[in-house]
Image: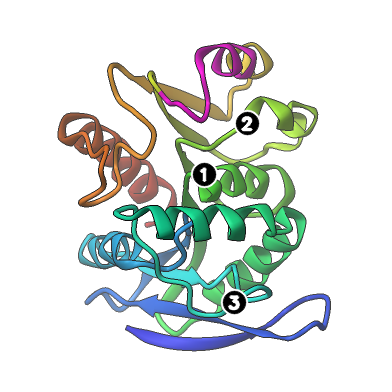
Amino acid sequence: MDEITLKAADGSGEFSAFVWKPAEESAGAVVLIQEIFGVNDALIETAETLARQGFIAVAPDLFWRQEKGVKLTDKSEAEWKKAFELMNGFDQDKGVEDLKVALEAARKLPGCNGRVGTMGFCLGGRLAVMMATRSDADVNVSYYGVALQNLADEFDNISAPLMLHLAENDEYFPAAGQEQLLDALEGNEWVDVFIYPDAQHAFARPNGVHFNARAAVIANGRTTELLAEILD
């Protein structure tokens, strides 16, 4: 793993992004978008898996304006409390701008073939959809993003493949919201939505409290196939 320093587009400071590279000399890149727990062990494991699959993985530290180097788990009440405090203080629009900076940096990394996508989880899943509507990423993948129906006004801006993985029993994105999302996306040729029966929020988080092996394997397989199709 390498660490690079990026300058915020608004001139407010600098933030770190962590990079994992595959053995291949030329590869597409994936900007990994954190959950509310920061660039933690679960996200690092995902990045390492992407590198083994032949992609460059880039994970920016998005909470840097509040606290740099956040690395929490889902295993204690105190960590959950802090994670929600960070999420509530997080400016999503600024986060998207930081992700766009990371996207352009990823395109220029040595060994990158110029094709870059995003993949996000939870809060990052919402930001991945915002990247689909506000950036020139080549592909975007969202795992259990929250309140996605509230982004419906932006869906006409989508012009690259977007894959959504939703949990049937997501306590943070209940059925009514999911139905509104599906209605808003009806007829959109760029978007594929998959809903995983009996799965809960964060079903694909490695070692997470709601990890669902079947749903995670199926979702991750679909993701890898799409990334390989677009980024290779």
Q: Label 1 is placed on what type of residue?
A: Gly
Q: Which residue is mark 1?
A: 125
Which one is in front in this view, the residue at disc 1 or the one at disc 3?
Answer: 3
Q: CA distance from mark 1 to mark 3?
A: 21 Å
State the image coordinates of residue 111 (x, y, percent, origin top left). Answer: 40, 80
Mark 3 / mark 2, whichever is N-terminal: 3
| Residue 179 falls inside the magenta stretch | yes
| Residue 42 falls inside the magenta stretch | no
Decide if residue 92 is on the left or right side of residue 36.
right
Decide if residue 153 is on the left or right side of residue 99.
right
Mark 1 / mark 3, whichever is N-terminal: 3
Which range is magenta?
Answer: 170-181
Q: Are marks 1 and 2 in contact (CB under 8 Å)?
A: yes
Decide if residue 143 is on the left or right side of residue 132.
left
Q: CA distance from mark 1 to mark 2?
A: 9 Å
> In the image, what residue occupies the spot 36% across and 40% down?
202
Q: Which residue is mark 3?
A: 67
State the image coordinates of residue 121 (x, y, percent, origin top left). Answer: 45, 47
